C-alpha cells in the first residue's frame, strides 16, 4: 500500500513570483517531507489545449531529478477537458496519446488521467458513450507505463462498472467523500486492478483520523481478492481550497494512514504476494 496526492496543491504565497520549475521543485520537497510515496507536481491542469509531448516529457525528467521518490505525471482526462473547452473529447484523446508515449520513453512509470467532471455519464447515454470512446482512443496501443484513471467529484456508480473496467487501465482512483457510492464500483472491480482510495476530505472539520484511511484501504483490499499490494490512499479531491500548510497537514495524515496499513499488514501477515511499495502498480 502507498500514499499519493490527487489534484492540485495550493501554491505557496511566499513563492508567488517563482517560475513553474521552481514551484514544482518546492512542491516535491514539501510532498516528500509529508511522507507520501508516489509524488506529483501538484500543478493545476491546463485545459486550454493539449500539452506538447516533448515539453511534458522534459518537464517530467527535470522534476524527477529533484526527488528520490517515484514521480507520476498527471494529465487531464479527455472527457472533462472536452467539457471545459471547444475541443471535443475524442480530439483531446488523440492529442494526449503521443504525450503518454513520450512520457513512457522518458522513463515515467505512472501516468494518471484525471477525470474531474464526468458526472453527466451517469445520466446521459450519449455522454457515457462519448466518455468510453475517448478513453478507448486514449489507451489504444499504449505500452511501457502504468495508466491510472482518477474519478473525482461525486458518485459515478450509475454509469455501471463496464464503463470503467472494460477500459485497459491498470488502476483507478475514486473519490469516496463526494462519491461514497463509488464503493459499489470498487466492490466489483477486477482483482488485478489497483484501487486508490480517495478517503480524506478537503473540507473544514472533516474526520482526519488515520483509522478511517486504514479501514478504507483494508476494505478495498478485501474486494475481489485484491490484497493490499494493489491498494493506495489519497485525499478525496483537490486540496486547492485550503491553505498550503493545511493541505500539507492533510497529506501527512494520508501518509501516516499508508504507513499504518503497512504496520497492520505486517502484524497480520501479507495480504497478497508482491512488493507493497507503490504496489498498486502490480498487475498480474
Image (spheres, grey):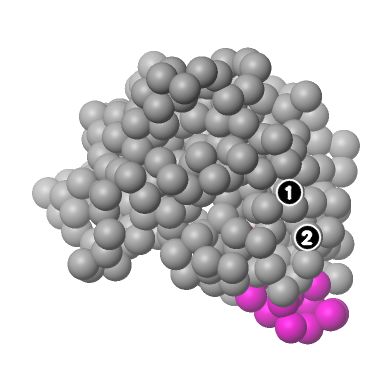
Q: In the rendered structure, which disc, 1 or 2, sits on the residue that comes first in sequence?
A: 2
Q: Dot 1 lies on which element?
A: loop
Q: Residue 233: where, in percent of width, then height?
A: 45, 42
16 falls in the magenta region:
no
Kindly identify which numbered label has been placed on residue 226.
Answer: none
Question: Is residue 211 positioned above or below 67 on the image?
Answer: below
Q: Where residue 138 sits: x, y (%)?
A: 79, 49
Farthest residue in the left direction? 14
Residue wearing tag 2: 161
The quarter of the rendered structure image containing the C terminus is top right
Q: Are marks 1 and 2 in contact (CB under 8 Å)?
A: yes
What residue span does the magenta drawing correspond to? 113-128
Which residue is rendered at x = 21% and y = 46% of the image?
A: 249
Q: Residue 47 is drawn in which quadrant? A: bottom right
Q: Position of residue 217 (x, y in %)?
A: 49, 42
Quadrant position of residue 254: top left
Q: Which residue is mark 1?
A: 189
**Left or right position of 92 against 1:** right
Amino acid at each position: 500500500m502507498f500514499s499519493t496526492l490527487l489534484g492540485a496543491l495550493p501554491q505557496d504565497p511566499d513563492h508567488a513570483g517563482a517560475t513553474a520549475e521552481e514551484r514544482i521543485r518546492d512542491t516535491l520537497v514539501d510532498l516528500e517531507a509529508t511522507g507520501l510515496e508516489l509524488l506529483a507536481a501538484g500543478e493545476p491542469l491546463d485545459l486550454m489545449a493539449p500539452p506538447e509531448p516533448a515539453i511534458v516529457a522534459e518537464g517530467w525528467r527535470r522534476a524527477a531529478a529533484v526527488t528520490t521518490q517515484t514521480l507520476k505525471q498527471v494529465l487531464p482526462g479527455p472527457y472533462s477537458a472536452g467539457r471545459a473547452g471547444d475541443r471535443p473529447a475524442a480530439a483531446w484523446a488523440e492529442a494526449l496519446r503521443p504525450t503518454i508515449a513520450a512520457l513512457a520513453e522518458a522513463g515515467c512509470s505512472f501516468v494518471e488521467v484525471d477525470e474531474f467532471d464526468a458526472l453527466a455519464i451517469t445520466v446521459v447515454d450519449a455522454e457515457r458513450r462519448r466518455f468510453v470512446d475517448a478513453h478507448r482512443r486514449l489507451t489504444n496501443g499504449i505500452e511501457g507505463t502504468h495508466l491510472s484513471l482518477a474519478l473525482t467529484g461525486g458518485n459515478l456508480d450509475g454509469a455501471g462498472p463496464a464503463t470503467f473496467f472494460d477500459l485497459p487501465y491498470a488502476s483507478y482512483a475514486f473519490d469516496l467523500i463526494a462519491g461514497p457510492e463509488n464503493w459499489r464500483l470498487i466492490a466489483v472491480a477486477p482483482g488485478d486492478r489497483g484501487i486508490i482510495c480517495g478517503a480524506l476530505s478537503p473540507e473544514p472539520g472533516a474526520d482526519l483520523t488515520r483509522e478511517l484511511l486504514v479501514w478504507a484501504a483494508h476494505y478495498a483490499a478485501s474486494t475481489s481478492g485484491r490484497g493490499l499490494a494493489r491498494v493506495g490512499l489519497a485525499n478525496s479531491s483537490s486540496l486547492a481550497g485550503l491553505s498550503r500548510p493545511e493541505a500539507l497537514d492533510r497529506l501527512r495524515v494520508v501518509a501516516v494512514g499508508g504507513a499504518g496499513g503497512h504496520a497492520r499488514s505486517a502484524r497480520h501477515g501479507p495480504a497478497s504476494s508482491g512488493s507493497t511499495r507503490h504496489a498498486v502498480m502490480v498487475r498480474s
